Amino acid sequence: MKKPRMNLKDLCIDREWSVFLDRDGVINKRLPGNYVKRWKEFEFLPGAVEALAILSEIFRYVFIVTNQQGIGKGLMSEKDLVSVHEKMLSEIEAGGGRVDKIYHSPHLESENHPSRKPQPGMAMKTVMDFPRVVLERSIMVGDSDTDIRFGHNTGMYTVLITSQPTQTQTQTQTPLPDLSFNSLIGFARELKKTTEANKTD
């Protein structure tokens, strides 16, 4: 049974936890109707690099899980994606953060491939690669219904990054996120405050 919505303090997050992050719309600006095919098209969202530094201090593992069907459409190559990610990781590390591994699915949405969110494939691969990961002690942070369904499908807690009020359950068939914030840095700062407060309780 899925856990009820809650406050960050209820989770009692410690170094045994992991965080999974979507990329486009969470870490970098999404390109509506297009794909980030090269580094010059990549733009960090405000505070994202700082947020990664904060999350790196809190969580044992930090992962990125991203659908990249631009590859499946032939608009970019795996090599293009690797080049973007190498530069992105360099900027994150320079800002004091880390990403333990990036997982991506190049498949088209129409394929319904098990590695493409909301299917659980990328999370299952993470558990195989990092045996200490426990999905029930993990948080999925994303900006779309697909990300929230992915989190629910894998037993993770879910955080929606959105500037819009969360819809009620009667308005959508998509499961509601456990929490929502208007930015990754907003989530990270609140989580830091909460974890520090928990240590003093």
Image: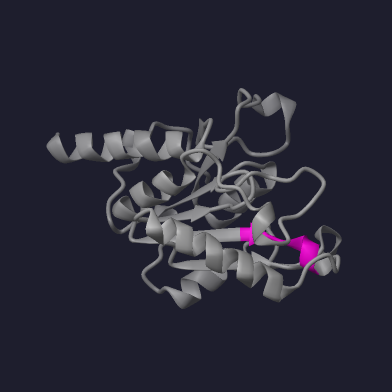
In which quadrant is the C terminus drawn? top left
Position of residue 152 relative to residue 193, above or below, is below
**Residue 14 appears in the figure:** yes
Q: Nearer the viewer, residue 105 or 3?
A: 105
> How was the colour assigned to the protein in this rendering?
one colour
Report x, y in % for residue 10.
33, 36
**Residue 51 placement, left or right of 122:** left
Report x, y in % for residue 192.
30, 39
Q: What residue appears at the point 44 percent right and 38 percent down from the top-left corner? A: 185
> Residue lying furthest left in this view?
200
Q: Nearer the viewer, residue 177 or 84?
A: 84
**Residue 5 placement, left or right of 197:** right
The residue stretch that appears in magenta: 66-71
Report x, y in % for residue 30.
68, 45
Tell me where residue 118 sits by quadrant: bottom right
**Residue 121 appears in the figure:** no
**Residue 149 placement, left or right of 189:** right
Q: What residue appears at the point 40 percent right and 66 percent down from the top-left corner? A: 133
Residue 196 inside the magenta-drawn segment: no
Tell me where residue 120 sits by quadrant: bottom right
Q: What residue appears at the point 44 percent right and 57 percent down from the top-left corner? A: 92
Q: Nearer the viewer, residue 128 or 48?
A: 48
**Residue 100 placement, left or right of 198:** right
Position of residue 2 relative to residue 69, above or below, is above
Report x, y in % for residue 86.
54, 68
How many marks do you count on the picture? 0
